[in-house]
Image: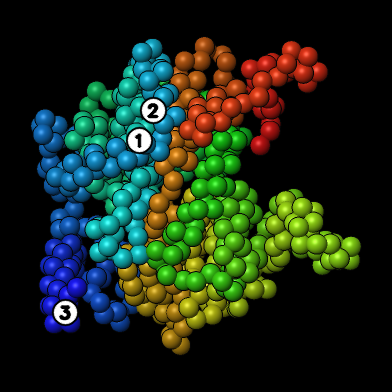
Amino acid sequence: MLSAVEGQKRCHEVKFKLDEIDIELTQGVATRRKSREIRRPSITLSREFSTTSTASYTSSDEEDDVSPREKLQTNSKNFSDFCIRNIKHADFGRREIEIAEQEMPALMDLRKRAQGDKPLNGARIVGCTHISAQSAVSWLWTRLTFSSYLLTAQMVLIETLSALGAKVRWCCCNIYSTQNEVAAALSEAGYSIFAWKGQEEEDFWWCIEKCITADGWHPNMILDDGGDLTHSIIKKYQTIFRGMKGIVEESVTGVHRLYQLAKTGKLSIPAMNVNDSVTKQKFDNLYSCRESVLDGLKRTTDIMFGGKQVVICGYGEVGKGCCSALKGLGAVSYVTEIDPICALQAWWVLFISSQNNYLKSCSPILQFILTGYMDGIRVVRLHEVVKTADIFITCSGNKNVITRESLDKMKNGAIVCNMGHSNTEIDVTSLKTNDLTWEKVRSQVDHVIWPDGKRIVLLAEGRLLNLSCSTVPSFVLSITHCTQALALIELFNAPEGRYKQDVYLLPKKMDEYVASLHLATFDAHLTELTDDQAKYLGLNKSGPFKPNYYR
């Protein structure tokens, strides 16, 4: 056992080492990037708060004051068609993939089953998806102790598509969600990756351009998350777009844009909506968000949820997942909704619990049985609770869900974040005015301070909380990526005329196949229909077991 003197000495030694790491990690972050003609304002990562009216946009992963666009980097094989933060971190990123692969057995199985046939041979896929999820509360301990699995999962997807015969170029759909070490591992493996954490808006669009245009590169497939890549190609490269075989889109926002394009006759190629696949809706949107929303809030704010009033704007699959998680930790939840069906789902049990005298007289177990499938959450309008709520979470896929008017009415210390794909749900632009002061607290956490001293806590500048500030389970991503891979294979190999210039759902048979690939992980054994049962239900014994409209 250490004596008090020895213990104090050891603490000083540890503190000294941490200070050294602190200095190393923050070197170059505290200074403004003077070489950029177009850049956002930034402030230092000092322990003291800034008192200037300057927004904090500097990433904790920045290791020097030179933009990746101004560096000339090559991997060990002299390959240089990429733009990332630092190629020297490739070994660390490669080790992370070994962990992720253990949680993604189905995607690995799909790769083994199909790589002999090379079903994507000839496919040239340009991708714009999330390439990370890890940005934890403490920027120091993030670097020392946490691993990121989302970009690693994307790496498994990219390598799977390559193993199936495709050529790829990739960028990130979120300026904060790139895990730099794994981007380095991808680039070291010879993939054209254009992404780093903490991009400027100009960098974001530049990276998309680099993925679309390259000497000898003519993409014929799109894998998108949010629609920004698709929008850029339609707007600037109509000839390339018309020659493509199809689009695979995985987000609410991107799917909404595709339906708008189809309605106006601007969608000249078929598109696959994998967001509304059952496997994507239930696992990525519902179950994954149920786990990751708490992770993101805890890492950024260290808040205790018990007794807190939380407003969830939108009660789709993501909203349901958020409510379920918060309710489990004792938070008092409210929902805002435009859809009467979703609103009824949230409210119904609250009504029968308070109005049904019989139910009140039942035992707790019977009450649970009778009401266990409803959620018991009050449905309100935002203005009714905006002055008293502690946490606001948007997950509607819409724009201006929380406006400056609502932000002005929030109480001191209110936490505001977004779990929907787009960064338009919270009107962050309205906060970038001279009358408000921005203080950077820690990575992805800002105080926005009003003239009277009131401050709100804004997370990830209104971008995706879970993908910017925490992790998403690799197993869930295995499900999503299997769905994406099968959608790409289906569109690329479909005979001419099967799919027209419209938006399609993934065939239910493929949806069920994705699910079946993951059952072995749990040693699950499906019951098989008898011939008589299959005839009675009008089904094939091997499926599909649900109609295409089932969700």
Task: Identify the disc placed on residue 61.
Answer: none
Q: Quadrant of residue 390?
A: bottom right
Cα separation between marks 1 and 2: 7 Å
* Camera-side residue of 30 and 25: 25
Q: Where does residue 37 sit, x and y in percent of width and height?
A: 21, 58
Give the mark nearer the N terminus: 3 vs 1: 3
Which residue corresponds to mark 1? 101
Which residue corresponds to mark 2? 108
What amino acid is labelled 3 in the image? Ser
Q: Where does residue 139 sit, x and y in percent of width and height?
A: 28, 63
Give the mark nearer the N terminus: 2 vs 3: 3
Where disc 2 sits, the SS reads helix
Cα separation between marks 2 and 3: 52 Å
Q: Where does residue 33 sit, x and y in percent of width and height?
A: 18, 62
- Which residue is drawn at the image coordinates 70% and 57% (left, top)? 375
Pair 3/1: label in front: 3
Cα separation between marks 3 and 1: 45 Å
Residue 123 visible: no
**81 sits to left or right of 147:** left
Which residue corresponds to mark 3? 3
**Mark 1: few, some, or many residues within 10 Å (few <14, many ≥20)?**
many
**Mark 2: few, some, or many residues within 10 Å (few <14, many ≥20)?**
some
Residue projecting furthest to the front? 1
> In what quadrant of the picture does the N terminus appear?
bottom left
What amino acid is labelled 1 in the image? Glu
Pair 2/3: label in front: 3
User: Is 260 located above or below residue 319 in the figure?
Assistant: above
